[in-house]
Amino acid sequence: MRADKIREQDSAELKRQSSDFREQSFRLRFQMAMGQTDGLKKLRVLKKDRARMLTVLRDRELHPETAPEPVAKKKKKGK
C-alpha cells in the first residue's frame, strides 16, 4: 500500500487495518514456524504497510495542525 493512499484514510480506519495486519502477520509467522507456508515476502510487505500506517497515525497525533484528518470527498451527481 502506498503512503499517499494511507494518508487519505481516517484514523479509525487506519487503527482497524493496523490491528488486522498485526493479526495476519501473527498467523503467517505461526504458519511459517509450523512449515506450512513460505510467506516470507508477504510477511515483509505486511510489516512495512503496518509501519507506514503507524507512522501516519503518530504524525497526526503529534502535529494535528499540519496533518489533519482527511475530509470525505463529495461525489458528483451524474446526469
Image (cartoon, helix red, strand yellow):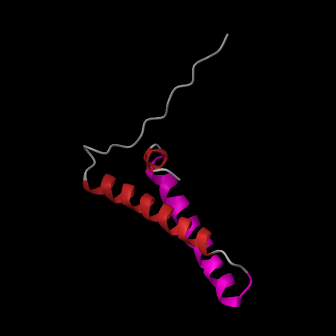
Q: Place residue 25 in its image quadrant.
A: bottom right
Q: Nearer the viewer, residue 7 or 63?
A: 7
Total marks in image = 0
Report x, y in % for residue 48. 48, 65
Q: In this view, does 36 lie above or below 21?
A: below
34 relative position to 40: left or right: right
Q: In the rendered view, does 72 fall on the left or right side of 75?
A: left
19 versus 72 height, above or below: below
Q: With 29 as the anchor, is 72 left or right in this view?
A: left
Instruction: Report the residue at 28% width, 48% height from top.
Output: 64
**Dominant secondary-structure state across the stretch colored magenta:** helix
- Seen from the viewer's position, the closer of residues 77 and 48 is 48
70 falls in the magenta region: no
Question: Percent from the top left, x then y, of residue 70?
Answer: 42, 40
Q: What is the span of residues highlighted in magenta in the rendered image?
A: 9-36
Displayed quadrant of residue 43: bottom right
**Residue at horizontal 43 percent and vertical 46 percent from the top:** 7
Quarter of the rendering containing residue 22: bottom right
Residue at the extreme right: 36
Hey, which residue is sitting farthest bottom in the picture?
34
In this rendering, the answer to whether 16 lies above or below 44 is above
Q: Position of residue 32 (x, y in %)?
A: 66, 83
Instruction: Please report the residue visible at 49 percent of the width from the left and 55 percent of the height from the top.
Output: 14
In the rendered image, the vertical position of residue 79 relative to residue 64, given as above or below:
above
- Tell me where residue 13 appears, x and y as whole percent: 52, 52
Q: Which residue is drawn at 48% across and 53% down?
A: 12
Q: Quadrant of the C terminus?
A: top right
